[in-house]
Image: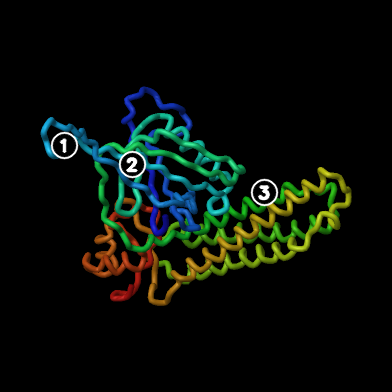
Amino acid sequence: MANGVFVIQELPGTSGRGAPFSGGVEEGARFDWTADTTPVDAATGGARACPNAPWSIGGELRTVKTWYPGAKRPSEQVLGPSLDDQTFEGKLDDRYNFSGFAVATKRRFEEMVARGNMVRVSYQTEAWEGIITKWSFPYRRSWQIEYSFTLSPHGKPEHQRLDRSPKTVRTPTQVVGQVSTTVDDTLAAHKLAPTAAMSGAVVDEAGTQLARLAVSKDVLGGLLDKVFGKAGLGRVTGDFGRLAAQVRDLRNISFELLQSLAELRSDVEVVTRTAMSVLNFEAWSRSLRFQSRILMGQSTKAAAELAERDEPSAERIYQPKAGESGYAISQKFYGTPHAWNVIADRNRLRYSTMLGSETLIIPQRGES
């Protein structure tokens, strides 16, 4: 599957059972899985988790055929349709989300299906309600867990209108938050370094680059708080450019870190050579290289997103309140509620009632 978000929404109170299976996850659990490399919501993840095979939708018409004596053809009574079970398979991968995503999602999913509530599964134009009757998690490693589950459909499918509008632009807080989380994961990976068995120069060089990462991340967080912490009518889009420049600094540092790690070899860098010290060295160096690559990719994309919003035609930004109407925002800036589509198009919004987490670009009238 591709070009859409695969959604699993638990329908609370539909199992007929008493208390929830576990207190760890409340009823009403929701999973948003996409084929993209960026999750729908950075806080919950879901990137590259979309089922990797076509959605098999089918069934059969149940009938009873009776041959009467002397009849040239049988009499066949239609009893009604029988829907086939639907099976979905895919994988949960930390590399496209955050550290611990695969394990956390597996546990949430297990707790949800064990309650026995009905769920609503939807993708593009198709939406079905039913009960998940089987599930399994082929466990490869803690950061990459496959999944398979079977839905027993109840009732007729609901056909949704296919929304081909582009995704809503991520807010600066969401963009910076994902990058900052990856920096933290990179710093945590360095704690695996077997410093006692390695030459001091290797640890010091990596530590210097990581210290630069930590400082750059703090500067980025401070800039975000200063510029967008209380975003209002008077902000200019040059602030996006400053954020983009700081994110590019993170990208450059992660690239330099990768270069310094590229030539590391256990037979050269490990002074105290034992089986355990070599294994610990490999675990440290590979984990740090892995996190550095993820950081470089995320920061490159984040910088491009922020720079894209830094345009001269968009002279200001605005952070709306929760529940504020798009038409009221249009009235505030343009003197008419009928220009809301200009703001919606520029920010790629698919709704007109604000959530309160948006940071909107207000373009010049007539430009989108």
In the orientation shown, which residue stands out farthest toward the right? Answer: 272
At 35% from the left and 57% from the top, the residue drawn is 320
Q: What is the spatial separation of the Cα atoms under label 1 and label 2, in whole angstroms?
A: 40 Å
Q: In screen coordinates, is 110 left or right of 14? A: right
- In the depicted view, which residue is nearer to us: 345 or 314? 345
Cα separation between marks 3 and 1: 73 Å
Give whichever of 307, 154 is nearer the camera.
154
Q: Which SS class for mark 2?
A: strand
Q: Earlier in the sequence, mark 1 or mark 2?
A: 1
Q: Position of residue 117 (x, y in %)?
A: 36, 32
Is residue 270 shown left or right of residue 250?
right
Question: How far apart, in angstroms, are the residues tagged by discs 2 and 3?
Answer: 38 Å
Q: Can you tell which mark lies on residue 325?
A: none
User: Compared with residue 316, is residue 44 higher up or lower down, i.e. above or below?
Assistant: above
Q: Which residue is mark 2?
A: 120
> Where is residue 33 drawn, in percent x and y?
44, 50
> Between tags 1 and 2, which lies in front?
1
In the image, is residue 265 above or below residue 149?
A: below
Circle on res. 74: 1
Mark 1 and mark 2 residues within 8 Å of each other at the beta carbon:
no
Q: Quadrant of the C terminus?
A: bottom left
Q: Specify the color scheme.
A: rainbow
- The residue tagged with tag 1: helix, strand or loop? loop
Left or right side of 329 for 180: right
**Tag 1: amino acid:** Pro
Q: Position of residue 210 (x, y in %)?
A: 70, 57
Q: How many marks?
A: 3
Please give the residue where the numbered disc 3 appears in the rendered image.
Answer: 188
Secondary element type, mark 3: helix
Could you tell which of marks 2 and 3 lies nearer the N-terminus? 2
Whether residue 242 is situated above or below residue 34 in the rendered picture: below
